[in-house]
Each structure stands twice: as C-alpha cells, then as structure tokens.
Amino acid sequence: MSNPYAPIPMRVEKSVTETEDGSIRTISLSFPDGTAPFGFVPGQFAELSILGVGEAPFGIASSPMSSDMLDFTIARVGTVTTELHFLEPGESVGLRGPLGNGYPVEELSGRDLLVIGGGFGFSTLRAFTNYALHPGNRGNFGGITVVYGARNPGLLLYRDDLCDWASRDDMNLVVTVDRADEEWTGMTGTVPAAVEKVKGVKSVLGGRAALVCGPPAMIRYTLPVLADLGLAPADVFLSLEMKMKCGIGKCGRCGIGGSYVCTDGPVYSLERLRGLPGEFR
C-alpha cells in the first residue's frame, strides 16, 4: 500500500508572474524521469511541499489534455506560498495528488455551460475551460460562456488564455473589473452584474449548468442571478477550494457537517451544499 503522505519530486520548468503587483504566480511542474504523468479531472487539487518549510493545497490550473506538465497558480499569502514564489526552473518541489473530486464532466456533457470565476478562484475553471475547448472534447458540450472578473485590470490572470478565448467563435467570453484604470476598455462592474448579461446569450442545447468558483461574496450574489436564469440547485456546481486542507480527510479541518471537502469535494452541487451546515459560506 502506498504512503498517502509521500510526495512525488516534481521539477520546476517555468514560473510566470500573473499579476502586476507580483502577488500571484503560476508555476509549471514536470514529472521525474521514468514517472508517467497521472490523469486527473479538472477541479481536482494537489498538495505542494517544500522540505523543511511545509505543504499547502492548490487546485490544478492546467487542463488534463494540455501536456505532461501541471500548472499551479499561487497567491503569496504565507510561508509556503512565499517559498513557492521564489522557486527557479530546475528546482524541486514535492507533490501529492491528484486529490478530491473534480467538476462532473460526464454529467455536464451535452449541456450549455456557464463558467463563472472571480479573482484567484479562477484557476481550476481555467483548467476546465481549456479541457472543454480541446478539439477532442469540444463536441461534448453546447454553448460555453465564461464570465471572469477581478478587482482591477492588473489582477486579471491567464492573459494568453483570455486573448485566445476572445478570438474564438465557439464560445462567449465576458471579462469585467470592479475598478477600471485609464487603459481599460472592457466591462466595469461586478461578476454577478456581468452574469446578468448572460440572459441575452442564446442557449444552444437548452439545458444549462453553471460552474462557479471565487470569493464568497461573489458566489453569494451570483447564486440568485443563476436562479433567475432558471438554473436549479442541481445544475450549479461550486468549488470550496478555501476549505481544502490535508487532502485525505485525516486532519478533520475540512469537515462541513458529515462531509470532508478534501475527499468528497472540493466540487459540490448547490443542491448538496444546501443539505450541509452553512459553515462553508
């Protein structure tokens, strides 16, 4: 039986600063020679560790269809994340994963999708969007609308992806910022307000589902908008990434009622969450 606490030694291939303030970076990791990349579902996460420093959970930000490398987007908020920010290509980092569930790709097949993210919570939604747009998967889904927001233009992530998605004619991209600067020519306003505009987007298949991840306030004010759009709680899927802890449900700190986010989540339908205590909010 393998040791669930034993990490895989991964190699840092690339580290990219995502935001103008330097607070968020994306690192790309490759598997060691002789180790086959593991499969995963968009929405799953992994624990990254640095020897002598500690470990922390992060959603996998790359698509399982993209390459043999894994991307993780990391906000510098503590000791572990600061050390991860300063890793250079060629250095090593430990990884345990993939962990948790993921977005229910089979259940989402054949439906129009609303992908709604805010701020740093967009990482696994980026993974899902690139998964759904892959030529091998695109035919499995109907219309895809991505609504993504940040506090200001300098905090928008994945600018190459945003440019690529904006150029496609098989999806609809809505990017908004709370506060514009003098160079911003896009939408200004909150994510829930931007989702309101989706009412005008024609449904391709008729059946819709929404994937949502972001700050709690964004989620709180987005859910009533989704209800107005006719989405039932069973059609809305949220990722509780902020509750992820040890990854295997042993420390107990991810517990909400009788469910453990690290093993039963982090992705839940809104229907199921409404049957759990409100402490996740």
Image (spheres, helix red, strand yellow):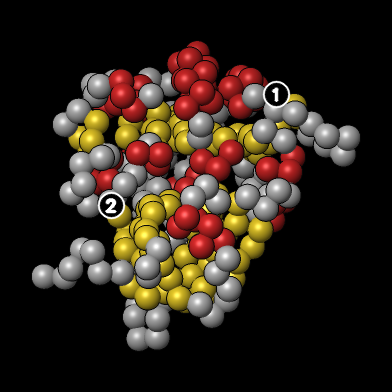
Judge by depth and name the residue closer to the eye, 96 or 239: 96
Q: Is residue 45 visible?
A: yes
Q: What type is the residue that disc 2 sits on?
A: Gly
Q: Residue at x 41, y 67 (%)?
A: 50
Q: Residue at x 35, y 39 (%)?
A: 243
Q: Is residue 39 visible?
A: no
Residue that label 2 marks: 247
> Which residue lies most toward the bottom here?
34
Judge by depth and name the residue closer to the eye, 42 or 86: 86
Q: Is residue 9 above or below residue 219?
A: below
Q: What type is the residue that disc 1 sits on?
A: Gly
Residue that label 1 marks: 189
Q: Nearer the viewer, mark 1 or mark 2?
A: 2
Q: Secondary structure at mark 1?
A: loop
* Relative side of 222 to 31, left or right: right
Which quadrant, please, contains the N terminus? bottom left
* Relative side of 124 to 39, left or right: right
Identify the image quadrant of residue 16: bottom right
x then y, percent, for residue 281: 38, 24
Near mark 1 (Cα within 10 A), the count class, few <14, some 14-19 or many ≥20, is some
Sequence-first disc among 1 and 2: 1
How far is mark 1 from mark 2, CA to CA?
A: 35 Å
Mark 1 vs 2: CB contact within 8 A: no
x then y, percent, for residue 220: 47, 20
Near mark 2 (Cα within 10 A), the count class, few <14, some 14-19 or many ≥20, is many
